Image: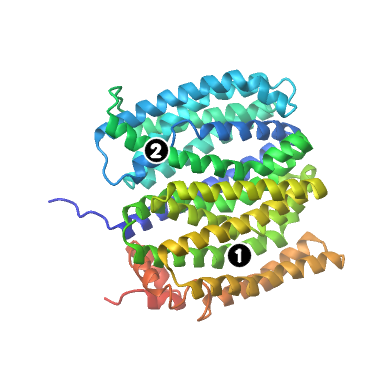
Amino acid sequence: MKKRKKSAAKSGISGMLWHFSGSVVQILSQFIVIGILSRLLTPEEFGVVGVIFVLVNFTSLFTNMGIATAIIQLKTISSKHLSLGYSMSLIIGILVGLLFYFIAPSVASFFNLNNADNAIRFFAIFFPLRSFNSVTSAILARDLRFSLIVKCGAMSYIFGIGLTSIVLAYLDFGYWALIIGQFSGVLVTVGLMMYYSPPTFSFRFEKKITSELLLFGSGHTLGHIFNYFGDNADKIIVGKSLGVVSMGIYTKAFQLFGIPTRFFGGIYDNVFFPILAKNQDKKEKLSSFYLLSTSFCFGVLFPLATILFVNAELIVKIMLGDQWGMVTFPFQILIFGMAYRFGTRINKSYLKSLGIIYKGAYYQFVFAVLMFTFCLIGGYFFELPGIASGVFIATFLNYLQMSYRLYNELNFAKMYFLQLHLKTLILYVPFFIATMILYKLGIKDAWIHLCLSIFIYLPLFVVFITSKKNIVFNDVNAPMLTQIFNSLPPGAQNNFKKISFLKNYFVKS
């Protein structure tokens, strides 16, 4: 007797739970690794690697020309698609790696990096490995085998990047500890992925299949190129104009800011994008899930951002140590835009799932222009805090323009969409303002702000989220919430049923 195929909803919930648990493990690991490395290495050493990664991440965009995304997006694929996908990705990765090797001195000169040629050249070997591995990861995602992706990611970070970097930093390898740690992480990922999904190769390039992979992939890559400049305009400006020490400080602020965004964004990109792609013709369902996603984004991330903002000084001191005090203010500015950044991730996933690739690339181009414009202006007048402010403004404007584009595609409930944003600002912005007023009055003690968070702010947030007209749990989202909660494993359902305001979302048997 054949096993019943899981529904998209149940596959999504299963994948989300796996990503949630795996991401929690990885985030806890990151906190430990970041905390140890920040005490073993200097801002300058982090800055050197941060500058190198600006170029590495850009070059990585070309390592498979979006072939991996095409494998997920195409409605039907054959074994020939997979074999050619592996072969094409590997060839492109080798070519990109060779090019990267030879332009290393020019890169070092542009960013004023002294004696860093060999460090930059070392990354040339990353590209074939990353390119090859992206296809395997795409196959696992298409097959909704999320548990394997999560396991590989966690093992790679803990035993590859984390352990290797810490040991080498302790042995005084300097920034090479970070570089070799990254390489170890890639090796662990490739080895595990190959074990779970052995690759196949074909060098008989059939025109139809090759064009299918590259046509979607090229549009995807074009969008990612513009998105790269949008995401990295701040780092390019810091690395070029403010130097490696400022780069080290800024990358740490951005790393702390990026952890919660990557946590939720990774779930959305890796779990829900494959499912959205399979339901790209069901506009009504996509519209309902989009509103729920946006409600969750602002209903959960804004209060989280509030707590992080209020306790930024304590977080930086505990996480990084005393030498990183200058991270606090840029981190606070960046954290205010966390919900808009994750909202943009949601929008991008929808654009990809709907196949709006080239128009999506145009919106990414606009984002890149916004980032360079506002970061240049902010950096010129206020250095790091100004650049962080430029990132916030550009992210906010980009979120608005992409949301408008999706409204034209999905025709979701416009008034509800506007109301949830307005309600979020009314509920949570006063906490940000109150913190700044306390700072101005000289009340800056980190432990006082922690007590305010625990005994005043958090209880108020619980009241907000359990109220009848809250941002997430309301009548508009009720049908989708009911479907999601009833797709949970039985044990999880029993636990959630014990929470009074969630009872109505379960179908009575």
Which callout, 1 or 2, points at the residue further toward the start of the chain?
Answer: 2
Q: Badge 2 is on which residue?
A: 68
Residue 441 is labelled as none
Q: Badge 1 is on which residue?
A: 302
Whether the residues at callouts 1 and 2 have beta carbons within 8 Å, the answer is no
Q: Secondary structure at mark 2?
A: helix
Q: Position of residue 266 (x, y in %)?
A: 49, 49
The mark total stands at 2
- The amino acid at mark 1 is Phe
In the image, 172 versus 104, the foreground residue is 104
Q: Position of residue 432 (x, y in %)?
A: 72, 67
In this rendering, does residue 369 appear at all?
yes
Q: Quadrant of residue 168?
A: top right
Q: Is residue 259 above or below residue 400?
A: above
Q: Quadrant of residue 341?
A: bottom right
Q: Position of residue 305 (x, y in %)?
A: 64, 61
Q: Is residue 375 left or right of residue 78?
A: right
Residue at 57% from the left image edge and 73% from the top image edge: 462
